[in-house]
Amino acid sequence: MKRTLAAIGLALAAVVATDARAQGITTGAISGVVTDSEGRPLEGVQVAITNSATGFTSRTVSREGGRYFVQGLEVGGPYNVLARRIGFAPQDRGNIQVGLSQNQRLDFRLEAQATTLTSIEVVGTPDVSASNSGTKTFVSDSALQRLPTLNRNLTDFIRLAPQVSTAGAGYSGGGMSNRMNNV
């Protein structure tokens, strides 16, 4: 009996070890260094890696020393890699293949380029009113039409405001006593 249990245990251990070994790396990676025309590393370069077959894009930014690293890419490709930063001409490389558990090295040397930014005019109204401060809840007319009510009374809709408590006698707004409210 002991030999049978030992044999079963040994067989299970062999199967589990085989399954664990089979669960290896199933993806690849692309990494490299981004430098300027004089060979100095560039930080803050946006690197976009797009799988041309699926359209899926992975993005990263070059770090200290101009290094970037993107892992978890599907094996195969082709991949299109775009490196760009304001003040430099973007550089695009296509038809990059990624191997199983391989790190495909792809370095970029970006040339300086003058960049003209378009001006943007921002117009808006302030969200804060000096004459009317405090918390608010806005319920639109269409919401009042759609929401059910028992007796068509406005106080049925007071419960929509998160600042209002209906526990106890009356309605308490903003943590105040119900005698202090105008409801």
Image (cartoon, grey):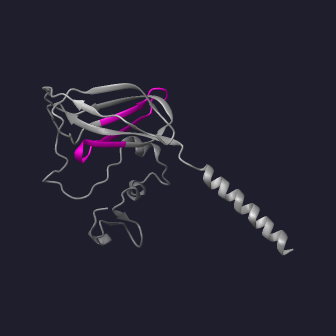
Front residue of this view, candidates 151 and 24:
24
The x, y position of residue 157, in whole percent, is 40, 54
Front residue of this view, candidates 40 and 126:
40
Question: On the image, which quarter does residue 124 sit in?
Answer: top left
**134 lies left or right of 25:** left
The x, y position of residue 158, in whole percent, is 38, 57
- Total numbered badges shown on the rendered structure: 0
Front residue of this view, candidates 97 and 140:
97
Seen at 22% across and 30% down, the residue is 110
Front residue of this view, candidates 162 and 90:
90
**8 lies left or right of 21:** right
Seen at 28% across and 70% down, the residue is 176
Q: Residue furthest right?
A: 1
170 vs 131: above or below:
below
The x, y position of residue 64, in whole percent, is 23, 47
Give the extent of the magenta segment: 47-69
Is residue 66 within the magenta segment?
Answer: yes
Question: On the image, which quarter does residue 56 sit in?
Answer: top left
For the C terminus, the image quarter is bottom left
Seen at 22% across and 59% down, the residue is 134
For the N terminus, the image quarter is bottom right
The x, y position of residue 20, in whole percent, is 62, 55
8 vs 152: above or below:
below
32 vs 119: above or below:
below
**21 lies left or right of 158:** right
Q: Residue furthest bottom?
A: 2
